[in-house]
Image: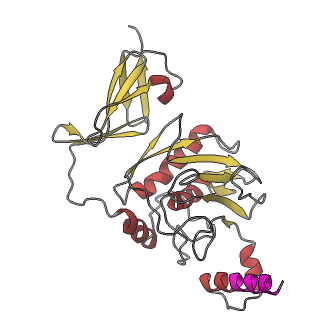
Amino acid sequence: MRKSGNTVASKLREMQSFFGLEVTGKLDEETYELMQKPRCGVPDVGEYNFFPRKLKWSKMNLTYRIMNYTSDLRRNEVDRAFKKAFKVWSDVTPLNFTRIRSGIADIMISFGTKEHGDFYPFDGPSGLLAHAFPPGPDYGGDAHFDDDEVWSDDSKGYNLFLVAAHEFGHSLGLEHSRDPGALMFPIYTYTGKTGFVLPDDDVQGIQELYEKCDAELSLDAITELRGEMLVFKDRKEIKYLFFFWTRFFWRLHPQMVEAELVLLKSFWPELPNKIDAAYENPIKDLVFMFKGE
């Protein structure tokens, strides 16, 4: 029992030190108030309890899949929040994120309550808002959001974009920051999503893992097709190139030995088995696909 007590006191001291509180090793009023604030469920101090530190993905092209949705927002609002959250990190690194709609993605995203299958249960409204696992196999990279919270796209409840951007930082290998102004600070604070700029502390952290974007790189054209960014340089596409044929399409990337064959409906479940033409309206973020005359 004495050993257990010392362990609790030690953890309290670590937490108090992390948040800049008076280090007493006791659950005093200031510490208790801090523990009641809405926060990320990933540990603040020491190593991740279940993974070694300094993990990172060994590739720059990552996939994500949204497994289910909260009822607090429309599906397109959830999709948009997650897409924007990933863009926070891809804007300052060479990372690229592609959404898939079936199969196993690098980052599997889901909403759940209480015990939701990973042995790290949520605690109901407020408290722990979400958690994510660092890069690796199995749960590695996955992000889980507590559906007992009220999720929003503004200041009501908890802003899904801000929480997701934080959790995806963990999915990429970042730990919590001691800087209260950093996105990776563990306590939730609504900062307003319009014109969000990633704080310098977070930029330095993610670029330490994945380096900076190439400041000398110039591009000829960029477009996007349902989450796939197409980038052209000197008349050559340096991301993905699509070839459609009957019920399938091929994706080709310069780093691929051969093109990847994909079933059309696995990427766009709502489409017919065959398309004849496609048109993108980038202003409205819409892609029109045509079948027949």
Screen quadrant of the C terminus: top left
Q: Which residue is drawn at 62% across and 81% down?
A: 19
Screen quadrant of the N terminus: bottom right
Q: Taking 283 as reference, is 40 above or below it?
A: below
Q: Which residue is drawn at 76% across and 53% down?
A: 115
| Residue nearer the viewer, 71 or 247 | 247
| Residue nearer the viewer, 134 or 241 | 134
> Which quadrant of the structure image shows residue 123?
bottom right
Specify whether 272 is left or right of 163.
left
Residue 276 image position (x, y, % from top left): 36, 15
| Residue nearer the viewer, 16 or 11 | 11
- Residue 11 included in the magenta stretch of the image: yes
Q: Taking 112 as reference, is 104 above or below it?
A: above
- Residue 17 included in the magenta stretch of the image: no
Secondary structure mostly seen in the magenta stretch: helix
> Which quadrant of the structure image shows residue 201?
bottom left
| Highlighted range, magenta | 2-12
Specify whether 167 is left or right of 276.
right
Q: Taking 18 as reference, is 107 above or below it?
A: above
Which residue sits furthest top? Answer: 293
